Amino acid sequence: MKIDDQTSFSLEAELSQIAFSDASAALIHEAKEHGLPFSRESSQVVQVMLPYGVISLRQRDDMVLLQLKAMDKTVLHQLKEGVLEHMGIGDATYARALRWQGDLIKNAPLPDFAELTVVSTQIVSNCFQRITLAGQGVERFLGSPIHFRLLLPADLSRDPVYPHLDENGRSVWPSGADNLRRPVYTVRRVNTDELTFDFDVFLHEGGPTGTWAQKVQSGEKLGILGPVGGGLMQAQQVLLAGDETALPAIARICEALPHTAKGAVLISLAKGNRYENLQLPDGVSFKQIERSNASELEQLLEEAKASYHKLGLPRTSESSLLFFATKKPVARKARTYFFEELNFAKENAYIAGFWD
Ligand SMILES: Cc1cc2nc3c(=O)[nH]c(=O)nc-3n(C[C@H](O)[C@H](O)[C@H](O)COP(=O)(O)OP(=O)(O)OC[C@H]3O[C@@H](n4cnc5c(N)ncnc54)[C@H](O)[C@@H]3O)c2cc1C
């Protein structure tokens, strides 16, 4: 599909207090970070192509025009909500002050919001709780999208107050005692017959989501936002590495691999932690690395580097996939090593910090 075919909806806003050169440098930096194609049509226009839309910056007279185009209003809304933060421009107050024009949704719930119902909960292993959800919104995860945000009251004893779009199309989030937490989770499995999905919560010390997951009962409601982030990635040659939080995503990727796939899976688990067995193609090896504390997550990176060289994973081939997800500082080091030192193609990789 060509980009032009995907961009039926659009929004634009004038950026204040910023020069075109600074705004376009920030946008190009972000595009490079994510391995996204971009173009400079002239010295006054920069465009970044996303899988489902386009972000453009234009110099018009003495102002900078930010334009967003997308194939549906939900994606357009997500672009609008995230673009300035991704570009590192302004703060929440600056973003709220922007006057968007075009296909704005007003006086409505956020378009990527859904209120789902907990159908069941079960213990997966000694450190994972599985929650099954049903309801309108599950169908958004039938294809490749695999991540979403939970919307949980910061004070779990309170009823949730969910965000909405006001009469100017701006998102209004609950504040004060109604504050929400928004951790990201992975859809572990979709049941297409029942229209339900499962997600697995790692039960770590001091985790409010784990506290919620162990207490929640069937029939209770849960607000989510999504899908968010990238979708399910497939490849013929893979290196997949992560800790407990990455296990649901790695399990999904492994189940979607062709049976002829080759490569390696490396998992770092705190001593005693367990998860269900992964379904691996014959050509994909599995190694579990036991750690006594979070500082030993560095070993995951060292093992990933060694496996990468042993496998000879092609840096630029579309048939390669490098997935690495764990605590943020270790993921940052992995990005430096694979992207900056080895020049691994970003479009064939997903290297992300999953927790602070
Ligand atoms: C794309 C993506 C997909 C993810 N998928 C999943 C998933 O399917 N299942 C899952 O369990 N997690 C997943 N995570 C990770 C999850 O979002 C984080 O662990 C998040 O911090 C959980 O929120 P919380 O309520 O447990 O803790 P927070 O309120 O974020 O943090 C509370 C305390 O717990 C600590 N903490 C957070 N995570 C860990 C950890 N893993 N180990 C030890 N201490 C920790 C924090 O440092 C903090 O001190 C995913 C993250 C991303 C970005």
Image (cartoon, helix red, strand yellow):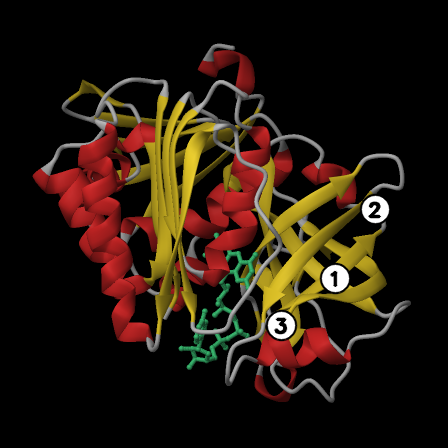
Task: Please provide percent x and percent y for residue 12.
Answer: 44, 37
Task: Measure how far apart labels 2 and 1 are at the Cα level.
Answer: 16 Å
Q: Secondary structure at mark 2?
A: loop
* Foreground residue among 144 and 77: 144
Q: Is residue 353 visible?
A: no
| Residue occupying image coordinates x 18% and y 39% | 339
Nearer to us: label 3 or label 2: 3
**Quadrant of residue 34 within the rendered picture:** top left
Residue type indicated by callout 3? Asn
Residue type indicated by callout 2? Gln
Count every numbered label the image shows and give the total: 3
Nearer to us: label 3 or label 1: 3
Badge 3: few (under 14), some or many (20 or more) residues near its Cα, within 10 Å?
Answer: few
| Residue occupying image coordinates x 29% and y 57% | 300
Q: Which residue is mark 3?
A: 126
Q: Which mark is residue 136?
A: 2
Q: Which mark is residue 238?
A: none
Q: Which residue is mark 1?
A: 131
Using the image, determine if residue 279 lies above or below residue 39: below
